[in-house]
């Protein structure tokens, strides 16, 4: 047996045969070292992958550190609210990730190019001329995200729940003893809140924006953010005989991290003061950014005008928090989508079922509405909010 440990050079007068044996010894010794290094790298890599997989599964199941969970799976940005990754297939679409918080705010604006004309059609709404985008700017691209071809019972689902969406689509929402028709009586039945009230929109007609490192479409001006959209919804509900309360508090004014906790306190306070409240609506706007930095403007045409597409985010109990109302809320979201799309083609995107509760366990019925995205204009979002009010009055 050859001793592979000794590395001393043989004497000069060593026979040629012994020299060959020595060379062979060195060769096998080097080969053995390389194999050991490869094995170590293999096992270390396997261990790291195993740890990451366990962490991802744990975070996804219990909704702890959801942003990390989604970044590992989809390579998205910080989770502070709702964002859609538009570069994935429909069945892989991910929402619920917001842009990172910045100290400054910019609202995209390009008045020299108007793609949101007062008269648009289904034939030209998605036309976009990239040559008109100013040098140094990134485009705001109109797109149809309704996924209508998947049917009315289709949902986005990031939980392990398997709801019967066909049955929920046909559920009688007024069959529950606690729920009265919203238009009955004079007491308030609907509460409208803004967990992320500072979420804003692009300027009307904007086709591009300048990425200067600031946060996109955020402002505390209530006339320019989702609070204005909530006001339009409340006004339309009142016209339809549904008494509502519109809370204008922007719960994210101090940052996204504590927004839902603050909103929860507000909702509980109003529900204690007005026990007749049966539906809580939380108004948001989505943030949809392509991998190349382009903003997506989810839009359709209603009566010759551009309208922002809508999406319902439905909370569940999958993340560990108890939400006994999630199936009814999902049924409401599905029926709202069907009502809107039957009347206004492609207005509503599929509901998105998520693991967090989003305070939807507090009221008998809840809707978290993503009305448009940061690529839409405020005017487009307001129009859609009015259409949502009409649909709610017909469903409930």
Image (cartoon, rainbow, N blue to C red):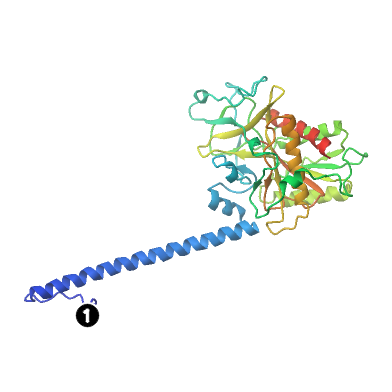
> Residue 173, located in which quarter of the rendered image?
top right
Q: Position of residue 177 (x, y in %)?
A: 89, 49
Reading the image, the residue beneath label 1 is 1
Query: Where is residue 206 drawn, in percent x and y?
Result: 60, 27
Examine the rendered structure and indicate whether residue 371 appears above or below residue 277: above
Q: Which residue is drawn at 91% across and 39% down?
A: 184
* Furthest-bottom residue in this view: 1
Q: In this view, does 40 lie to the left or right of 269?
A: left
Name the spot of residue 308 as percent of width and height, x first.
68, 32
Left or right: where 176 falls relative to 257: right
Residue at the image point whose x is 48% and y is 27% from the top: 135
Give the camera-side residue of 186 and 174: 174
Would you call the spot at circle 1 few (<14 residues within 10 Å), some (14-19), or many (20 or more)? few
The quadrant holding residue 145 is: top right
The foreground one among 362 and 90 is 90
Observer-nearest residue: 331 or 43? 331
Quadrant position of the N terminus in the picture: bottom left
Quadrant of res 143:
top right
Nearer the observer, 95 or 263: 95
Element type where label 1 sits in the image: loop
Q: Quadrant of the C terminus?
A: top right
Whether residue 129 appears in this view of the structure is: yes
């Amino acid at each position: 047996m050859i001793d592979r440990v000794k590395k001393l050079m043989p004497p000069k007068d060593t026979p040629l045969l012994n020299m060959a044996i020595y060379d062979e010894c060195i060769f096998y010794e080097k080969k053995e070292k390389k194999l050991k290094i490869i094995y170590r790298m293999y096992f270390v890599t396997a261990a790291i992958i195993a740890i990451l997989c366990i962490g991802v599964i744990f975070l996804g199941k219990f909704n702890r550190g959801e942003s990390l969970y989604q970044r590992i799976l989809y390579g998205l940005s910080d989770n502070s609210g709702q964002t859609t990754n538009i570069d994935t297939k429909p069945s892989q679409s991910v929402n619920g990730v917001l842009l990172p918080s910045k100290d400054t705010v910019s609202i995209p604006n390009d008045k020299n190019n108007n793609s949101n004309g007062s008269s648009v059609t289904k034939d030209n709404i998605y036309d976009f001329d990239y040559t008109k985008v100013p040098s140094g700017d990134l485009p705001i691209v109109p797109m149809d995200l309704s996924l209508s071809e998947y049917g009315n019972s289709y949902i986005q689902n990031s939980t392990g729940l398997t709801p019967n969406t066909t049955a929920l689509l046909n559920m009688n929402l007024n069959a529950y003893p606690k729920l009265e028709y919203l238009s009955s009586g004079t007491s308030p039945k609907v509460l409208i809140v803004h967990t992320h009230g500072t979420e804003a929109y692009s300027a009307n007609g904007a086709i591009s924006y300048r990425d200067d490192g600031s946060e996109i479409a955020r402002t505390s001006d209530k006339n320019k953010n989702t609070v204005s959209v909530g006001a339009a919804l409340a006004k339309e509900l009142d016209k339809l005989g549904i008494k509502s309360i519109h809370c204008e508090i922007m719960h994210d004014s101090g940052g996204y991290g504590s927004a839902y906790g603050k909103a929860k306190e507000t909702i509980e306070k109003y529900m204690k003061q007005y026990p007749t409240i049966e539906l809580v609506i939380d108004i948001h706007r989505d943030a949809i950014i392509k991998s190349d930095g382009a903003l997506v403007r989810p839009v359709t045409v209603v009566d010759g005008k551009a309208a922002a597409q809508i999406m319902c985010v439905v909370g569940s109990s999958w993340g560990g928090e108890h939400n006994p109302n999630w199936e009814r809320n999902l049924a409401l979201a599905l029926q709202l989508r069907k009502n809107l799309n039957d009347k206004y083609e492609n207005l509503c995107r599929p509901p998105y079922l998520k693991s967090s509760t989003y305070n939807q366990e507090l009221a008998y019925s809840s809707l978290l509405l993503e009305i448009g995205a940061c690529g839409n204009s405020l005017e487009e979002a307001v129009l859609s909010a009015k259409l949502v009010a009409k649909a709610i009055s017909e469903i409930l």
